[in-house]
Amino acid sequence: MVPFRPVERARPDGEPSLLLLCDHASNAIPPDLGDLGVTEADRARHIAWDVGARGVTLALSDAFEAPAVLAGFSRLVIDPNRGEDDPTLVMKIYDGTVIPGNRGADAAEVARRLALCHRPYHDAVTAQIDRAVALGAPPRLISIHSYTPQLRGRAPRPWHVGVLWDQDDRIAAPLLARLREEDELVVGDNEPYSGRLPGDTLWRHGTSRGLPHALIEVRNDLIADAEGQRAWGALLARCIADVLDLEIFEIEEAPRR
């Protein structure tokens, strides 16, 4: 099994005006939880992590010499891309797979996992943002995820990449336009998921703090190996650089729900 650590950081002293995030970078499980009763095959697939997202995030961190904060635990333990009061924070069944180790996760166990994993990750994101603001460079937030070509027997997903966003399109709108300039690339706007999820990572650190942000979803069969991760890291770096060169972003007043 992958070694467990709540947080992985890359280039923490890097270019402060860009911060890369990866909520589902790892399929690691804390030792005291064993394997949660989940097979090795299931722990390797998308229910446990976003396949390939870590490699793409680190490639972007290298390209921009920018900091990255990555969660070092499986979303089967607790999902860092959910608010603390979200009913899907600790899943008991995921894409048809029962998670036996979560069946008895009561309020006390959820609180323990929050303290062990969820909060250290978000505290690290907050600390990185605070550093950038103190340096006079409020960061642009880019979060990297991946998704399956097909889910639960539904129709195949046609997109190669999607950009998710909620109320702030300062990065999302130009990034969508730039990605669509790439030949033969099918780009989804809030596909295959919606970015309008109160309490998620970008709501917490982007929307609520008035920072420009976007979430990029890459289809995971395209980044399942190191070669694909490097290629997509380079492609996204070109597109993101073009978008971020357009203007200087300021902190905006956080919208109200």
Image (cartoon, grey):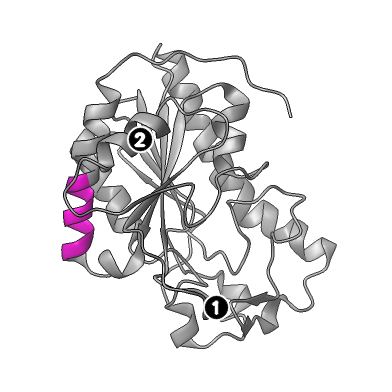
For disc 2, the neighbor class at 10 Å (few under 14, some 14 to 19, many from 20) is some
- Please state which amino acid type lies under the numbered disc 1: Arg
Question: Disc count in the image?
Answer: 2
Q: Which mark is residue 251?
A: none
User: Which of 248 and 20 lies nearest the eye of the viewer?
Assistant: 248
Amino acid type at circle 2 is Pro
SS type, badge 2: loop
Q: Position of residue 220 (x, y in %)?
A: 35, 66
Q: Is residue 231 magenta?
A: yes
Q: Is residue 214 above or below residue 26?
A: above
Mark 1–mark 2 CB contact (< 8 Å): no
The residue indicated by pointer 1 is: 152
From what the image shows, is residue 226 above or below residue 204? Answer: below
Q: Which residue is mark 2?
A: 12
Whether residue 108 sits left or right of residue 53 in the image: it is: right
Seen at 42% across and 78% down, the residue is: 44
